[in-house]
Each structure stands twice: as C-alpha cells, then as structure tokens.
Image (cartoon, helix red, strand yellow):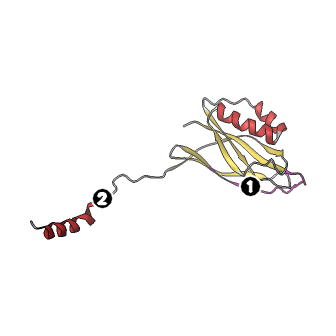
Amino acid sequence: MSFKKFLIVLILIIPFYGCEEDKDPITLEETEIQYNILESGSFRVSDDNTINEQYLVFKNQEEWSVFLSLMEFKSPEKGKEFENLDFNFTDKTLLIITSEYDYTCCKEIKINKVYRNQGQIHVTFEVDPSTEAEQITSQSYLLFEVNKA
C-alpha cells in the first residue's frame, strides 16, 4: 500500500474513531426530603459582622462547632444560645438558613423545597419581609433538621 492510500484511509477513519455513544449518562435525580423546623428568629449584628444569605448543612458536631465559633464572633448572644442546642448528629443532619443583613428586623424565611441530589442536600427558599418591621439591624435565621440518608 502506498503512503498516499494509507493517508487517505487514515483521514477517512479518524473522524469516526472518536464518535462513541455515551451508554451511561449521568442522571440528576432529585429526591425531596422531609424536614423539621427547630427554631426561627433573628440575631443582631453590626454592619461589619454580617453573614451571607445562604443555607448551611452540618453533618457532624465538628462542622457545627466551626459555625458556632463564627456565630460567637458575629453575634455573641445568639452564638451562646446555639451552643446550648442539644442535637444528635447520629440520625439527623442540622441545617440553617440565614437571610441577608438588613436594617429592618424580622424577615420571614420560607422553605420551598429540601431535596437530595447526588448525595448532597439542597434547599430552595425565599425571604419575605415581615409586616411588623422594626428599625433594628439584624439577620433572620431558620434552624431545621432532616434525617440522614
């Protein structure tokens, strides 16, 4: 076989060589899970001690302890209260949602959905302003638990 014929055959085969069908696509399956609200409220913070609007998942006491040290720095009163929470991480996972920092107190946090996706817990939520807004710099929170998978 001449070099030209070999090159032509090679050029014709190469485009089809990489075209392999993906036989095992990754499925993103969401499994909704039940939750139990433990506590909701707000904590006072100053402008430079805010916590981002977010949800956090604590699977064990060590993760919770790291957050407690942050809370004790940001809001000492609430940090001490959270420290007294008696929670068993053996069967449950602890979660907290914090709203964004605001100059009016007591926004309501509403959970839309708590679900597992690829072994991770996810939360969708909304923060609605309360009708009884006070002029106090604070952040709202919602503390809740789910069963371990």
Q: Position of residue 123 (x, y in %)?
A: 63, 49
User: Could you tell me which residue is drawn at 26 percent across and 61 percent down?
Assistant: 17
Q: Nearer the viewer, mark 2 or mark 1?
A: 2
Q: Which residue is mark 2?
A: 20
Q: Is residue 78 magenta?
A: no
Span colored in magenta: 123-137
- Mark 2 neighbour class, 10 Å CA radius: few under 14, some 14 to 19, many 20 or more: few
Position of 117 compared to 146: left or right?
left
User: Could you tell me which residue is drawn at 14 percent across and 67 percent down?
Assistant: 3
Q: Quadrant of residue 74?
A: top right
Which secondary structure dominates the residues rendered in magenta?
A: loop
Q: Position of residue 60 (x, y in %)?
A: 63, 33
> Tag 2: residue type?
Glu
- Mark 1 neighbour class, 10 Å CA radius: few under 14, some 14 to 19, many 20 or more: some
Q: Which residue is mark 1?
A: 127
User: Could you tell me which residue is drawn at 13 percent across and 69 percent down?
Assistant: 5
